[in-house]
Every structure is written in structure tokens, then in C-alpha cells.
Image: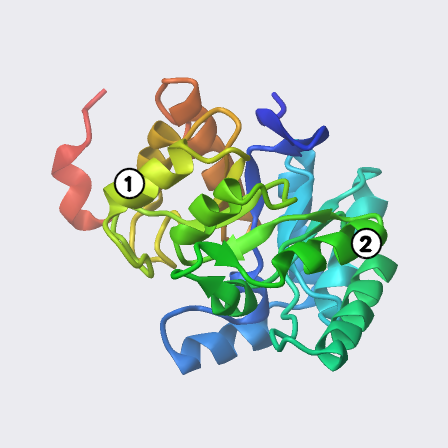
Amino acid sequence: MSFPRTEIEGISMPRMIPGINWFMGFSHQTRARDEFLRNYQTRERIADILEVFARAGIDAVYGVVDEWTKLLDAIKDVEDRTGKKITTIAVPTLDVHDSQEAFDANARILDSHAAVGATFILPHQACTDALLDRRERRIRNMDRICEMIRQRGMVPGLSTHMPETIVYADETKLDVATYIQIYNARGFLMQIEVDWVYRSIRNADKPVICIKPMAAGRIEPLVGLAFVWATIRPQDMVCVGTMTPDEAKELIELSLSLLEDRAALLDLQRTRSKASVERKK
């Protein structure tokens, strides 16, 4: 069975999307863990993981940056192996200064992402959130940035850690097609209470991609995914991180079981302390 799908501005998208933090060494835990990930995740290992997703109908990747050739090469390998086109959601860091020099620099950044085939451009939260103006209830200069993205044949969106971003973008009718928002049951890296972020996602005018559903490894997959899948809309998506092909398989099956309201067909971890819990045949 192919994974359920939605659309972003008419572009078909899987409702689950693999992210890149566990590929590129952003653990949100320790520097040692970051270094382990950067050394462990080769082009070949990344491709093996993304192939599992692609063969399940999950043919997109979130978090691409044009200079990460290891990741881009792995995506190309998966396309060659599966014959599927992988939709890439790029998250470049743009210059937030209000000057012609900044816009010229951003034009070059956007040109380079167009050259590597990015479908969506969602400026990274480091720049999106820096431009958010709570007093004026708008995101400064983002209309011009969105226009530059459109001019290059890519679809604009916003990546954010601030729940106001979705509200202000909708209020001002900003020309974006989707949002990235942190959303997890623990409230990890979320700036206000979970129920308020829940409301902003439910009320969003555009589809929302929810990131960090397992709080960068702090929440067990069943708990994290069950919460997010149960509280988002059918048009929304969930971005997940995995380190191995087997982890990818587990998250796919677990998510399908939650969406289909059935028991997951997964072998649980086994330790001596759990022997007494298992049902005897």
C-alpha cells in the first residue's frame, strides 16, 4: 500500500516526509552525537534509508540545502534505483538585512537552489523568525522574497519555530503555499503551550508540515506519532527523522497502523524484564 497523500498548491505530496537532521548531524542532543551522525551517515547509507521511504510512496525530502552534496547525491541515487522523482523541500538561510546587497545575495542563493531542482523553498526559521514583526503583525520583506522564489519557478513557504508566523502570514495573505511548524506532545522547542500551537495548525489557511514529532528522540515513536497524527488535519504532513532503513520501515508501518486504526505489524524490542509480559501460546 502506498502512503496516504495530500497536495501543496496542486503538487501531490506524501503525508510523511523524511527530514535530514539525522543525516547531516543535527541531533539536538550533544556535540558528540552530532559528530557521530556526520561521520556515520555516508551517501550510501542515506540513500538506503531514502529508498525505503520512496518504495513506500514517500517520495519527498525536507531540509535540503544546495551545498549538501552528500545528501543531493543520495537523492539522485534513490531516483536512479527506484525510477521515482524525489520532491525536494529546500530550507536555505537567507540574508535578513533590508538592503539591495542582501537581496542580491538572496537572488544568488535562490538561483543555486533552482539549479539543483528544488521544488519548494521555505526560508529557514533563522531568517523567517528574525523578520517576524509582532508589533506590525507581519513578516518584513518576505513578500519580496516570495516573489523572487516564484520568479525562479519554485513554490514559496515558510519554516518557523514561532506560532505567530502562520497567523501573520495568513492575515496578510502572504504568497506562500505551506508552513513548517514544530509540533510534539512534549512541547520541545515550542515557544508556547502545545494546545496553542495545535490551534494555529488547525486554523492555518495552508497545509502544515509538522517537524520534530518525536522531539529529536526524546519521545518514543508510538507516543510521538500517535499524538501528531491524531491532532492534525488530513491535508497536513509529518516530518520524521531516521538513522537506518529498519527505523524507516518501523515508522512507516507504525504511522500506517495509526492512520488505519489497527495494530502495528511490528516486532517489539525484547529484554529479560519483559519476558513475563508476553502471552504464552
Q: CA distance from mark 2 to mark 1?
A: 33 Å
Rendered position, 75 above or below 65: above
Front-most of 42 and 98?
98
Disc 2 packing (10 Å; few <14; some 14–19; many ≥20):
some
The residue indicated by pointer 2 is 76
Rendered position, 157 above or below 67: above
The N terminus, quarter of image: top right
The residue positioned 46% from the left and 35% from the top of the image is: 204
- Three-letter code, disc 2: Lys
The residue positioned 63% from the left and 55% from the top of the image is: 122
- Asked where in the image residue 177 lies, by quadrant, the reply is top right
The C terminus, quarter of image: top left
Q: Is residue 265 left or right of residue 60?
A: left
Residue 194 image offset from top left, x and y in percent: 26, 46
Rendered position, 223 above or below 212: above
Disc 1 packing (10 Å; few <14; some 14–19; many ≥20):
few
Residue 201 image offset from top left, x and y in percent: 41, 38
The residue indicated by pointer 1 is 223
Q: Is residue 111 left or right of residue 163?
A: right
The residue positioned 60% from the left and 46% from the top of the image is: 174
